[in-house]
Image (cartoon, grey):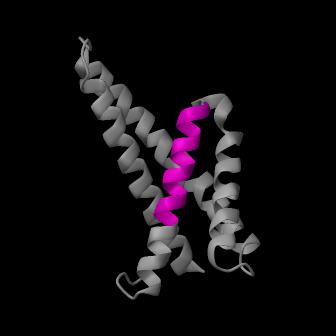
């Protein structure tokens, strides 16, 4: 179980990193005149986002694994995607519909890729 939590925490960190790249790219599009203040705000937002993605994403991902344990193949993947995106909808009041859905889907994809890499013995946890 600890191995699974460590793996999903890694997925949360990668999801936050991808969110950071997207936000930094957005900040570099003109006309941002107060770049330093924007980057300080970005660091604060990303710190909060990492904690949220770690706690909420980890919980949802573990729940998804429990619910879809008996399913196989494409049915398991679709059910897992629905669970992740449904959980993403729960946070739309604070993040907005599009961003919450994107973060949920990115976390789902990261989780599935990590499972595939572990199954193929490419990554070890």
Q: Is residue 75 above or below residue 40?
A: below
- Magenta-drawn stretch contains 109: yes
> What residue appears at the point 55 percent right and 71 percent down from the top-left corner?
5
Q: In this view, does 30 lie above or below 91?
A: above
Q: Is residue 17 left or right of residue 48?
A: left
Q: Is residue 43 above or below residue 124?
A: above
Tell which of 55 and 100 is nearer to you: 100
> What residue appears at the point 44 percent right and 34 percent down from the top-left corner?
45
Q: Is residue 6 left or right of residue 88?
A: left
Tell which of 39 and 84 is nearer to you: 84
Quadrant of the rendered structure where residue 36 is? top left
Of helix, strand and loop, which mostly describes the magenta segment?
A: helix
Residue lying furthest front: 74
- In which quadrant will I find the C terminus? bottom left
Q: Which region shows up in magenta?
A: 97-111
Quadrant of the rendered structure where residue 83 is? bottom right
> What residue appears at the point 46 percent right and 62 percent down from the top-left corner?
110
- Magenta-drawn stretch contains 104: yes
Image coordinates of residue 6 in percent, x first then y, are 49, 72
- In which quadrant will I find the N terminus? bottom right
């Amino acid at each position: 179980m600890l191995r699974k939590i460590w793996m999903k925490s890694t997925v949360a960190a990668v999801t936050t990193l991808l969110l950071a790249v997207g936000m930094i790219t957005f900040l570099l599009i003109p006309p941002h005149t107060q770049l330093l203040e924007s980057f300080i705000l970005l660091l604060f937002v990303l710190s909060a986002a990492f904690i949220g993605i770690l706690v909420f994403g980890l919980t949802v991902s573990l729940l998804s694994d429990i619910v879809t344990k008996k399913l196989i193949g494409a049915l398991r993947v679709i059910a897992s995607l629905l669970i992740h995106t449904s959980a993403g909808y729960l946070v739309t009041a604070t993040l907005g519909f599009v961003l919450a859905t994107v973060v949920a889907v990115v976390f789902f994809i990261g989780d599935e890729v990590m499972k595939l890499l572990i199954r193929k013995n490419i990554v070890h946890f």
